[in-house]
Amino acid sequence: MSEAIPLTPISSYRGIGFDDRMDTVEFRVAERAHIVVDSDICRSCTTKACVTACPANLFAPTSDGGILFNYEQCFECGTCYQVCNSEGALSWTYPDGGYGVVFRQG
Ligand code: SF4
Ligand code: SF4
């Protein structure tokens, strides 16, 4: 029989709020947008799933049915790419080296 692996008590994980976590993150904004949204394709999208799925709230629906997008505070999580089901609406790459999310402390 194998030995039981000791578990870490839950109390040893400190509760760190979202704002405190975000204080450890810096965004170095590159000139090149690493995500490009084709708002013309978005106009025929019925779900607008990116609007609710993006944890950074970077997608905003426009009055003409399109999407306004700002890449500057993107977490690079890839969720928008996963939820978008319209081919060609999103072009997704990582930011160039040295740009994008930078963690200020461990
Ligand atoms: S990015 Fe994708 S999910 Fe978001 S509105 Fe455009 S087509 Fe729809
Ligand atoms: S990669 Fe994540 S944070 Fe960046 S735009 Fe997409 S869903 Fe939002």
Image: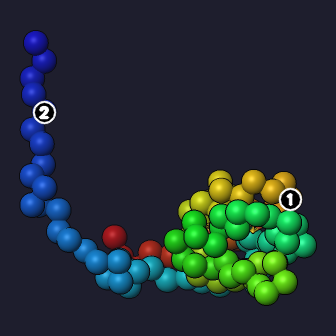
In the rendered structure, which disc, 1 or 2, sits on the residue that comes first in sequence? 2
Judged from the image, the secondary structure of the residue bearing numbered disc 2 is loop
Ligand 2 quadrant in view: bottom right
Asked if labels 2 and 1 touch by Cβ distance under 8 angstroms, the answer is no
> Looking at the image, which is closer to me, 25 or 77?
77
Question: Is 92 on the left-hand or right-hand side of 72?
Answer: right
User: x%, y% of residue 92?
Assistant: 74, 62
- Measuring from the top left, give residue 66's x and y in whole percent: 81, 78
Residue 13 visible to the viewer: yes
Seen in the picture, residue 36 relative to 22 is either above or below; the reply is: above
> Could you say which quadrant of the image residue 106 lies in?
bottom left
Q: Which residue is labeled 2 in the image?
A: 5
Residue beneath the point at 10% across and 12% down: 1
**Which colour style is shown?**
rainbow
Q: Which residue is mark 1?
A: 88
47 lies left or right of 65: left
- The answer to whether 16 appears left or right of 23 in the picture is left
Q: Amino acid at mark 2?
A: Ile
Element carrying mark 1: loop
Q: Position of residue 40 (x, y in %)?
A: 90, 73
* Residue toward you, 50 or 9: 50
Residue appearing at x 17%, y 68% in the figure: 14
- Expressed as whole percent of the image width and height from the top left, the position of residue 75 reads 55, 71
Closest to the observer, 31 or 80: 80
Residue drawn at 25 percent across, 74 percent down = 16
